[in-house]
Image: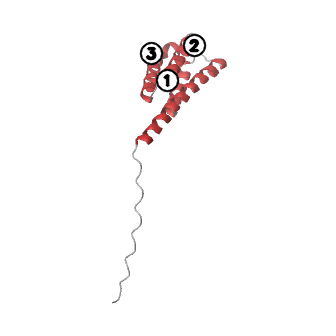
């Protein structure tokens, strides 16, 4: 989750967004969020994140001089938080599934009985 949040935060900073390509940038972020939230597994969500990352790289020069407005930052953060929440749910589900698939831990062996005392006939 931290990697996704960092990536999305850097994307918001890189995009700047406040005129120019702001509408397109927000639209792309919302599309990425929607794709991530529709995914059934982490791999699908990573693919959606990577698609957004590629768009950011391709458009960085066009958008880098934009100045983000406070309302834009707030809206972008809300979309970012929704994408993070969806990714967290997918990761939690994957972890739970992995735990369920793991074989149960066998019970511990009982301690060995102390040796019997010798008997004198």
**Residue 22 bears which disc, if any?**
2
Q: How many marks?
A: 3
Q: Quadrant of residue 73?
A: top right
Q: Position of residue 98 (x, y in %)?
A: 43, 39
Tell whether label 1 touches label 2 (CB within 8 Å): no
Residue 45 shown left or right of residue 118 in the figure: right
Disc on res. 36: 1
Q: Quadrant of the C terminus?
A: bottom left
The structure residue drawn at horizontal position 51% and vertical position 29%, both measured from the top left corner, is 87
**Residue placed most toward the observer, 62 or 25:** 25
Name the secondary structure under disc 2.
helix
Task: Determine the residue positioned at 51% across, 24% down.
Answer: 37
User: Which percent across, then down, holds residue 107?
Assistant: 42, 56
Mark 2 surroundings: few (<14), some (14-19) or many (≥20) residues within 10 A: some
Q: Residue 13 location in percent, x, y? A: 56, 23
Dot 1 or dot 3, earlier in sequence: 1
Which dot marks residue 17?
A: none
Disc 1: CA contacts within 10 A as few (<14), some (14-19) or many (>=20): many
């Amino acid at each position: 989750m931290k990697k996704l949040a960092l990536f999305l935060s850097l994307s918001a900073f890189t995009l700047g967004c406040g005129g120019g390509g702001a509408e397109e940038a927000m639209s792309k972020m919302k599309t990425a969020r929607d794709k991530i939230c529709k995914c059934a597994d982490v791999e699908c969500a990573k693919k959606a994140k990577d698609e957004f990352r590629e768009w950011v790289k391709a458009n960085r020069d066009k958008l880098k001089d934009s100045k983000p407005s406070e309302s834009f930052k707030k809206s972008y953060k809300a979309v970012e938080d929704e994408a993070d929440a969806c990714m967290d749910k997918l990761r939690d589900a994957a972890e739970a599934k992995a735990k369920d698939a793991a074989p149960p831990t066998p019970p511990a062996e009982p301690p060995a009985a102390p040796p019997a005392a010798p008997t004198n006939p």
